[in-house]
Amino acid sequence: MSNQYLVAGPDGWSEIDGIGEMTRGGTPNFDSLAVLGGPPQNYDVLGTALAQSPAFQNLLAKKAAQGRPVMHQQPLRMARDWDFPLGPVSGAAGTTTTISFQPQAYFRVEKLMATDTGSPAGFGTAVSQILVGQRLQRPATGSSTLSIFFSQQSLGNGLRWDTCQPAFQIALTISFVQSCTFYGNLFGKAVV
């Protein structure tokens, strides 16, 4: 039993018999559907009748849409609240340390809360530098801000830092005024 296929070429419909045969009469080593001595021809296996069919075009469009992602010009809306704990980090008086972490999603800090075990609380450490990637989030004046100014009771310590991309780090440099332990937390929005 032989399978028969129709192909459309420049000379109209031609018939091909069998699965392993190119044309009737076997498998020649040249394109037997082309004019002898002429350039090789391209044949449309689906045929021009199918290609011009609106139902076939709809089927192709549906298959193509399933095979690739759909892109829209809309901002991402899947945001959620995230927090990152900083510490505990202990240090001797006069030393500095840098706390850094790398978010796994787009993250924008909106609030920094900090305290320490100094006497009184909040006077033992100071935040001297904040970086998101390579961008400074505080003025580079060389001065530090005591942790008491980032306590939960302080008014207006809401911040809006630059958005940190997943490949970058957020780094805080903490200076120890007294020998104590620093505790902090960053609150913000992450886009997932």
Image (cartoon, helix red, strand yellow):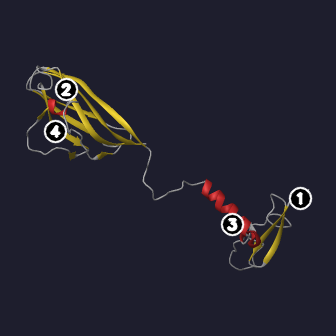
Dot 1 amino acid type: Ser
Front one among 147 and 20: 147
Q: Residue at x 85, y 67 (%)?
A: 24
Q: Reply above or below: 93 against 189.
A: above
Looking at the image, tell me whether mark 2 or mark 1 is earlier in sequence order: 1
C-alpha distance separating marks 3 and 1: 30 Å
Q: Residue at x 15, y 20 (%)?
A: 180
Task: Describe the element under mark 2 as helix, strand or loop.
Answer: strand
Q: Residue at x 23, y 46 (%)?
A: 134
Picture coordinates of residue 159, whole percent (x, y):
24, 42
Looking at the image, tell me whether mark 3 or mark 4 is earlier in sequence order: 3
Dot 3 amino acid type: Gln
Q: Reply above or below: 168 against 87.
A: below
Q: Nearer the viewer, mark 3 or mark 1?
A: 3
Q: Nearer the viewer, mark 1 or mark 4?
A: 4
Q: Quadrant of the C terminus?
A: top left
Q: Quadrant location of residue 2? A: bottom right
In the displayed orientation, state which residue is furthest to the right: 1
Task: Describe the element under mark 3 as helix, strand or loop.
Answer: helix
Looking at the image, tell me whether mark 4 or mark 2 is earlier in sequence order: 2
Task: Describe the element under mark 1 as helix, strand or loop.
Answer: loop
Query: Label for residue 57?
Result: 3
Looking at the image, tell me whether mark 2 or mark 3 is earlier in sequence order: 3
Q: Which residue is mark 2?
A: 115
Q: Which residue is mark 4?
A: 129
Q: Which residue is mark 1?
A: 2
C-alpha distance separating marks 2 and 3: 65 Å
Dot 4 amino acid type: Gln
